Amino acid sequence: DEAVLELHVDDRLHKLVLSMALGATKEHQRATTYHALLVANGLWRETGGLRFGLDAPDGEIEQCLDLNLNDIAVQYLIEILQDFVDRGRVWREIIALHGGLNSEEIEQQHPDFNAGMLRI
């Protein structure tokens, strides 16, 4: 399973924002899926600040995480990126199976990138 991450640097706030698209929900599952994501957002202390949002009103769900630029060491960043992708894969599967796209639709959404691809 390939993952596409976006990294955004905010120099003014001294932070790096990680973002990963997880897919869109089917209309009849939106309320249930959004409820689960709101509960997950409320657990930000337990998840290290992981949060979810939409890229448009009826768009794809995105997983996001803010990191303090002053606290980032290379090994720490590698561990955080791997954990972020692992969590994204779990959420993508949850959304696909219980409130989102079917597996064929997911395959069509993700371009054929190399496994190590990182979009900045």
Image: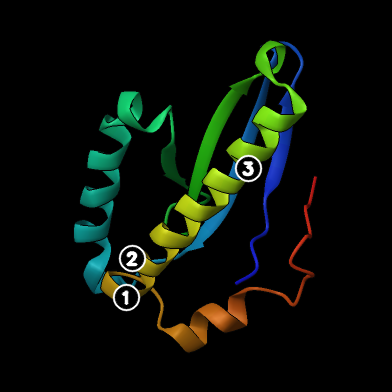
Would residue 60 be visible to someone looking at this image?
A: no
**In the rendering, at what x and y percent does residue 54 appear?**
46, 49
> Which numbered tag is attached to residue 81?
3
Say if 58 sits above or below 105 in the image. Answer: above
Q: Regarding mark 1 in the picture, which secondary structure is present there?
A: helix
Q: Which residue is mark 2?
A: 94
From this view, report whether residue 93 is shown above or below residue 35. below
Of mark 2 and mark 3, the one earlier in the sequence is: 3
Measure the alpha-carbon separation of dots 1 and 2.
Answer: 5 Å
Mark 3 neighbour density, 10 Å: few (under 14) some (14–19) many (20 or more): some
Residue drawn at x 73%, y 22% is 73
**Residue 72 can be seen, yes or no:** yes
- Label 1: how many residues lie within 10 Å, few (<14), some (14-19) or many (20+)? few
Tell me the amino acid under the disc marked 3. Leu
Place of residue 51 in the rendered image (x, y in percent of width and height, measured from the top left): 42, 37
Q: Nearer the viewer, residue 49 or 35?
A: 49
What residue is shown at x 30% (from left), y 47% (from top)? 37
Query: Amino acid under label 1?
Result: Leu
Amino acid identity at mark 2? Ile
Q: Nearer the viewer, mark 3 or mark 1?
A: 3
- Between disc 2 and disc 3, the foreground one is 3
Residue positioned most to the bottom: 104
Q: Which residue is mark 1?
A: 97
Residue drawn 36% across the image and 71% down it: 100
Tags 1 and 2 touching, CB below 8 Å:
yes
Compared with residue 26, is residue 32 higher up or lower down, i.e. above or below? above
Binning the other alpha carbons within 10 Å of mark 2 as few (below 14), some (14 to 19) or many (20 upward) gives some
